[in-house]
Amino acid sequence: MAEADFVHALKRRRQVSITVAGRRTGRAITVPVWFVADEFTLWLLPVYGSETQWYRNLEKNRGITVQAGTRTQEFRARLLKDPAEVSTLVERFREKYTPGEIKRWYKGLDVGVQIRLSSRTSPTAAPAGT
């Protein structure tokens, strides 16, 4: 039931807060981020691509906490570096937030993050259209 509640909370949001461990200090760092999601997976697109600090922290420690409203869950992130996967993810972000917003705010489009929301196996591992 908690997974369903979390997915429902995601549907009502334009952004979530993520918390990652600092790669040097181990200190918890929380930042707001845009996302796209379906019932199985949450995807994040770092604003400065592979140079984004929270992404660099995930390279060292894949643990991530996601907060959507009052719902919070801990996950393990999968880093996306394959150009085809990242390109598909960028298109999903453009569909949700508009191409103009993505062009305005996102300065690096070389990586992404995939977070499996469900303990069940997702039918697609890549960020395909919903």
Image (cartoon, grey):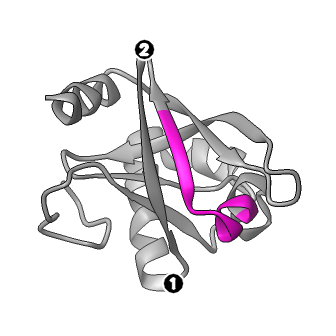
Question: What's under tag 1, amino acid-wise?
Answer: Pro
- Specify which label sits upstream in the sequence, 2 or 1: 2
Left or right of 90, for residue 123: left
Residue 52's x, y, as percent?
A: 76, 58
Determine the residue positioned at 19% across, 54% down: 119
Q: Quadrant of residue 1?
A: top left
Q: Quadrant of the C terminus?
A: bottom left
Determine the residue positioned at 18% across, 45% down: 39
Mark-to-mark CA distance, 2 and 1: 34 Å
Determine the residue positioned at 49% across, 37% down: 66
For label 2, the residue is: 70
Q: Provide the residue span drawn in magenta.
A: 56-66
Instruction: Give the secondary structure at mark 1.
Output: helix
Residue 44's x, y, as percent?
A: 51, 52
For label 1, the residue is: 83
User: Is residue 129 positioned above or below 30 on the image?
Assistant: below
Residue nearest the observer in this picture, 70 or 8? 70
Question: What's under tag 2, amino acid-wise?
Answer: Thr
Residue nearest the observer in this picture, 104 or 115? 115
Determine if the magenta segment contains residue 96. no
Residue 121's x, y, as percent?
A: 14, 65
Q: Nearer the viewer, mark 2 or mark 1?
A: 2
Residue 60's x, y, as percent?
A: 70, 69
